[in-house]
Image (cartoon, helix red, strand yellow):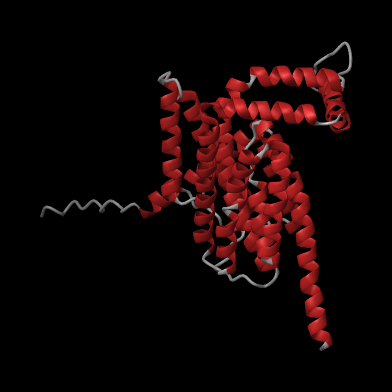
Amino acid sequence: MDSRQVSVAEANRGPLAGSILLAVIVGALLPVIALTQISLLVPVLMLGGIMAAYLGARSGWIPVGVLAVASGVSTGFLMGGTITLVLLVASIAPSAVVVLGARSKRPFFEQMNAGVIAFIGALVAATLVAYTAYGGRMIARFVDVLRAEYNRMPDATLQPMVEWMNAMLPVAGTAREQAMTVASFRAQLSGVLDLMQQTYAQMIPGALLSGAILSGVLSVFWANWTMARRGMATNESFVGMSGWTLPPQLTLGAVGLWAVGLLLMGTGRANGTTIYMTISQAVGAAFAVQALCALNRRMLRADRPLRRRRLLIGLLAVAGLLLRGVGAALAYVGVASALFGSHGAIRRWMQNRPMDPPDDDNSDQ
């Protein structure tokens, strides 16, 4: 065999072997990561789908299959068959749309639309599966699963979290007579879960929907960025963040939808608050992405180094996911950018608006 052929074969085996190992690790951790995200009431990223899109673009379908099997086994062992099916449908299934789009080099924003729709559609399908299995007790069932999962965790796993909370309480200005222990943390957590069941019912739909939107965006971006790094993308199939803007129609529609949700909450309807929170989180996710892209364009025009731009965008993205105040601030900045920025809906409308005819004092003569 030619030495060049050997080196190519070894190069292909390397990424594939590494991708399979990564798939096994992520698949094993996937149910714990999902539960942690939901328990924090942050946008629930479909990490399995995002990772599957990356692995499919990097190494083909084999590691995607390994990821599905590993996550299925892990979730089935921890939570049972129904939750396994829900997780696989919501997280792994839509990645096939993303991988096919990236490998076929479809126009980037067509891929983005298809990816977001695929993740939202998969979330709806997974919700139907859960509703069929659990009926109206989906949230209560989730709280029971969450409580059982935390009770199953060994003390050593919770100890770093307890130490972090003991360190942060004085910073937050909260005094305690005795330091928190793992036992007291478990007791408080159980009480919090009981009290927060209603909050979960209001917040989880929005956390899931906003997470699906962000998962579609991230998976399409990461898959095509991976293809571009390998020299397998085109200028049409991959567009960097500096080229992303919300279309004017989508911007105005999102603002209008948010206003409708606000009105529904104001009417005092039984589900008004849940509807508003769901709409608000979904719309906020879209506008937060717009804010990050606008910031990236501004830093690019200021000739900031690439590493600095990536670091700042990454830190803001993580902070926006974990800290509600940062996420809200990003959403408001995104609204302003999408409406009044250089590519904003209002700016475009003003530029395309037909000019009034000039006054002519002699027009009647």
Which of the 4 image quarters holds residue 195? Answer: top right
For residue 356, above or below residue 59: above
Which of the 4 image quarters holds residue 200? Answer: top right
Q: Position of residue 67 (x, y in %)?
A: 70, 54
Q: State the residue in front, 96 or 212.
A: 96
Say left or right for 120 vs 72.
Answer: left
Identify the residue shown where x is 58% and y is 21%: 198
Tell which residue pokes out farthest to the top in this image: 177
Tell me the quarter of the image containing the N terminus.
Answer: bottom right
Q: Position of residue 38 (x, y in %)?
A: 65, 34
Say left or right for 268 vs 101.
Answer: left
Q: Position of residue 168 (x, y in %)?
A: 83, 25
Q: Could you tell me if residue 309 is visible in this image?
A: no
Tell me the quarter of the image containing the C terminus.
Answer: bottom left
Q: Could you tell me if residue 120 is visible in this image?
A: yes
For residue 226, above or below residue 167: below
Q: State the residue in front, 317 or 161.
A: 161
Q: State the residue in front, 146 or 243.
A: 146
Q: Position of residue 305 (x, y in %)?
A: 74, 57
Identify the residue shown where x is 82% and y is 89%: 2
Tell which residue pokes out farthest to the bottom in this image: 2
Identify the residue shown where x is 49% and y is 35%: 279
Identify the residue shown where x is 44% and y is 20%: 270
Say left or right for 265 vs 21.
Answer: left
- Labels in figure, total: 0
